[in-house]
Image (spheres, rainbow, N blue to C red):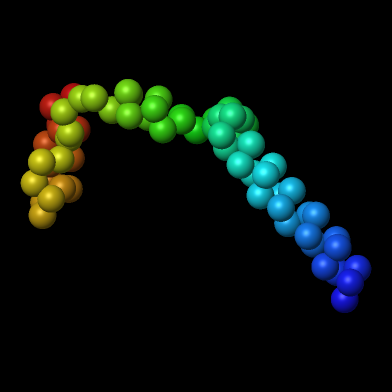
Amino acid sequence: MVRYCVIHSITIPSLFIADWLFFSTGLAYNVFGSPSPNEFADSRQGIPLISYRFDPLEQLDEFSISF
């Protein structure tokens, strides 16, 4: 029991610290190729395609016909 407590008192906090560093430095966004939250918000400044939520498929069809 003592060995379990000693091992896990070191490994569990180190996993949390490593995870925090992985995301706080932005390395997770670079590794997985996803946009970081500030990049994602900057790229979505346009007008939304769907304005009426009860009939989105019809609006998307109208949008795709226009192209």
Q: Residue at x 16, y 28 (%)?
A: 47
How many numbered marks, from 0 up?
0
In the image, 11 versus 35, the foreground residue is 11
Q: Is residue 3 left or right of residue 18?
A: right
The quarter of the picture where residue 18 lies is: top right
The quarter of the picture where residue 32 lies is: top right
Q: Residue at x 80, y 62 (%)?
A: 8
Q: Is residue 17 visible?
A: yes
Residue 52 point in image, percent of width and height: 8, 46
Residue 12 point in image, percent of width and height: 73, 56
In the picture, the quarter occupied by the C terminus is top left
In the image, 64 versus 42, the foreground residue is 42
| Residue placed furthest toward the bottom | 1
In the image, 44 versus 50, the foreground residue is 44
Q: Residue at x 91, y 68 (%)?
A: 3
In the image, 52 versus 61, the foreground residue is 52
Residue 6 point in image, percent of width and height: 86, 63
Rendered view: 27 above or below 1: above
In the picture, the quarter occupied by the N terminus is bottom right
Q: Is residue 36 left or right of residue 15?
A: left
Residue 28 point in image, percent of width and height: 59, 35
Q: Is residue 66 left or right of residue 11?
A: left
Q: Residue at x 46, y 30 (%)?
A: 36
